[in-house]
Amino acid sequence: MRLVTGLAAALLALATGTAAVAQTADPGPTLRNIRQKGALDCGGHPGAPGFGAMDSRGVYRGMDADICRAVAAAVFGDGERVRFTVLTSAARLPALQSGQIDMLARTTTWTHSRDTANGLNFTAVNFYDGQGFMVRVASGVRRARDLEGASVCISSGTTNELNLADWARANRINIRPVVFEQNDATTQAYEAGRCDAYSTDASQLAGIRTGLSRPDDHIVLPDIISKEPLAPAVRHGDDQWFDIVRWTIYALIEAEELGVTQANLDEMLRSERAEIRRLLGVTGDHGPMMSLDRRWAYNAIRAVGNYGEIFERNLGQASPLKLPRGVNDLWTRGGLMYAMPIR
Ligand SMILES: N[C@@H](CCC(=O)N[C@@H](CS)C(=O)NCC(=O)O)C(=O)O
């Protein structure tokens, strides 16, 4: 019945040339439920500085946390209408599959098996990462190939386990993986000297390093052994919700490309540029097409800034990690960040 109604509205819109489709857009079950609850439930990392971790004042911060706030702002006009559930690597997929959370933004690699067999849909990459190694400076190890015979601390339920085994086999390097279920257990074991190296996504290692008691005693090696495209995910079965999360991330990237920032947002409402006017909802029905307010992207940018601002605050020069933009720069500057057009 709903299909027939939608079709009728579409035909009417075609016939009259109006935006009737947008105004009658079906929110889908997830958005309807989120509105009823009054908050977005977002799954996050228990402690990955720069991505998702509690700061000293008890505020949950990081790039993934900010993506959740942006989606909450797109939905409610308020980036604080979000509840964070921190999840271990092993618990994160079941939490999304079962409906405990509405979206997962937790340093999660977009892989084929997760996207198919595990019933998830990855929305858009918010950080291109790769697996690396951290070692003690005193070990003398400077390249991954020096790890012959080393014990390596890793977390279970991650892509890191298989990558490490594949890499060791391909390079004929003997490695002894020491596997832990909790992230802090892995970190503590490494710090206590139970492993020669710690292996996970290189950007996470940079964050974990800042939390060690003597960061300068440790280095992250330059070698990267895998592709880890990290992307917020939703569960299969709700295309409308999938669209909302995906396009909110695109809006943040597009805002950076167009020079729209948290600070100049209101000034930009008066811009003559068609792309900026559509992004900020001055013209067009892009919010209503997703059953959201016309100001969905304006609200998301107002809550957390554009993608570049999110990056700098959490991972870049304004953060303890000081990661370079690298491949996470905009495509216009030689990076991989490329938002699909809002039109
Ligand atoms: N991107 C990888 C790894 C992400 C990841 O979760 N890494 C580990 C190492 S820091 C972790 O968080 N373990 C923590 C835990 O399960 O508590 C994945 O999606 O599997």
Image: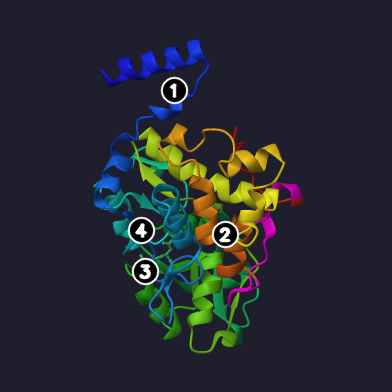
Looking at the image, tell me whether mark 2 or mark 4 is earlier in sequence order: 4
Could you say which quadrant of the image residue 239 lies in? top left
The residue that label 3 is drawn on is: 46
Labels 1, 4: front one? 1
Looking at the image, tell me whether mark 2 or mark 1 is earlier in sequence order: 1
Q: Which residue corresponds to the image point at 31% horizontal and 55% vertical from the top-left?
A: 39
| Residue 233 placement (x, y as % from top left) | 41, 47
Residues under numbered marks 1 and 4 in contact, where contact means CB atoms less than 8 Å apart: no
| Residue 34 placement (x, y as % from top left) | 30, 47
Label 1: few (<14), some or many (≥20) within 10 Å?
some
Query: Residue 20's mark?
Result: 1
Q: CA distance from mark 2 to mark 4?
A: 17 Å
Q: CA distance from mark 1 to mark 4?
A: 29 Å
Query: CB at mark 3 closer than 8 A to ligand 1?
Result: yes
* Ligand 1 picture quarter: bottom left
Q: Is residue 145 left or right of residue 70?
A: right
Query: CB at mark 1 closer than 8 A to ligand 1?
Result: no
Q: CA distance from mark 2 to mark 3?
A: 24 Å
The residue that label 2 is drawn on is: 305
Question: From this viewpoint, is residue 62 visible?
Answer: yes
Query: Residue 81's mark?
Result: 4
| Residue 36 placement (x, y as % from top left) | 25, 47
Residues under numbered marks 1 and 3 in contact, where contact means CB atoms less than 8 Å apart: no
Label 3: few (<14), some or many (≥20) within 10 Å?
many
